[in-house]
Amino acid sequence: MEKVIEAIQQAAIAIRREIEGVQFDYAKSQNASGEQQLKLDLMSDEIIAHHLAQVPSIKAIASEERSQVQELNPGGAYLIAYDPLDGSSLIDVDLSVGSIFGIYEGAFEGGNLIASVYVVYGPRTELVVAREGVERFILTQGRWIFKESLALGERGKINAPGGTQKGWYPHHKALIQSLFEEGYRLRYSGGMVPDLHQILVKGGGLFSYPGTTDRPQGKLRKLFEVFPFALVFERAGGEAIDDRGRRLLELPCDDLHETTPCFFGSSYEIQRVKTFYQTR
Ligand code: P6P
């Protein structure tokens, strides 16, 4: 496992350098979810694939930018699913973006996720690893320095509501509004990684990407985005559920690029989700 995390740390340093370049162009291709790909998306994907391919314990890798799983070492123990540069379109306006990694053992299933890693490319470059606990590292002069362990309190003050509001169902709109009426602050950049990182570092709140009339199964991908962050939030003392109150990590995953409505937060806010969604 240490070699996997070291490979991710090295890849993140290389991606940071590319982001600081001036590559803004879109490629001519789309990913498996039909989204236009930035050349940076493809470069980041190549960088990660190259570093992971050096690790003998990795059996296969799956990228949000590719339609198929890539076999590496038949005797390897780990399967890695990753989103190489989540929210990459935010780079045009100089907002933070991130990379997300799920480390699975035996199968690409939520129940087989044994660790997750994410990287935030912002004013600094930070990396968070969730195994038994949740550890935060900062990139300083080319080296990753441990800063702190992250933990969520009982509740927070941040409300990060995703999705097109025009498509929100009435019970979801009522949930979001009720938190604002309690004084929660709107903190939503459109980048899943910095938006969730902020809730973790500040110690609580709610991030929601619901099912909507235009996207009933939400937008965020189970294997590459949702499961890895579900593990982070649970190991930090919070919860991660879908629109039926089920643990996200218990959801089946029949297709590599499958999405799900998702809610990540400290326990008070997740209880509010359950209350508003049970009465829908
Ligand atoms: P919306 C970025 O494209 C992304 O996949 C996530 O990083 C982010 O949380 C979400 O989409 C934002 O989607 O529909 O709220 O703009």
Image (cartoon, helix red, strand yellow):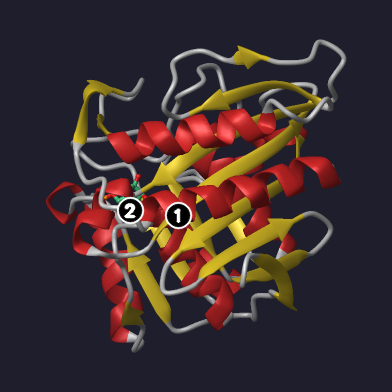
Q: Residue at x 78, y 15 (%)?
A: 73
Residue 257 % position (x, y): 45, 24
Q: How many numbered circles does the render carry?
A: 2
Which disc number belongs to residue 216? none
Residue 98 % position (x, y): 45, 54
> In what element is the residue under mark 2?
loop
> Does residue 92 appear to the left or right of 104 in the view shown?
left
Q: Quadrant of residue 152?
A: bottom right
101 up-or-down from 161: above or below: above
User: What crowding class fits label 2: few (fewer than 14 Cα within 10 Å), some (14-19), or many (20 or more)?
Assistant: few
| Identity, as a three-letter code, of the amino acid under mark 2 | Gly
Q: Which residue is mark 1?
A: 17
> Does residue 20 appear to the left or right of 166 in the view shown?
right
Q: Nearer the viewer, residue 246 or 221?
A: 221
120 up-or-down from 104: above or below: below
Can the viewer see residue 224? yes
Can the viewer see residue 247? no
> In what element is the residue under mark 1?
helix
> Does residue 166 appear to the left or right of 40 in the view shown?
left
Q: Quadrant of residue 69?
A: top right
Quadrant in the picture for the N terminus: top right
Residue 44 % position (x, y): 45, 39
Q: Which residue is mark 2?
A: 21
- Give the distance between the C-alpha atoms of the residues marked 2 and 1, in whole angstroms: 7 Å
Circles 2 and 1: CB distance less than 8 Å?
Answer: yes
Q: Nearer the viewer, residue 14 or 52?
A: 14
Whether disc 2's CB lies below 8 Å from ligand 1 is answered: no
Query: Among all residues in the image, which is located at the extreme left?
Result: 166
Residue 267 % position (x, y): 61, 70
Q: Residue at x 71, y 37 (%)?
A: 103
| Identity, as a three-letter code, of the amino acid under mark 1 | Arg
Q: Residue at x 33, y 25 (%)?
A: 33
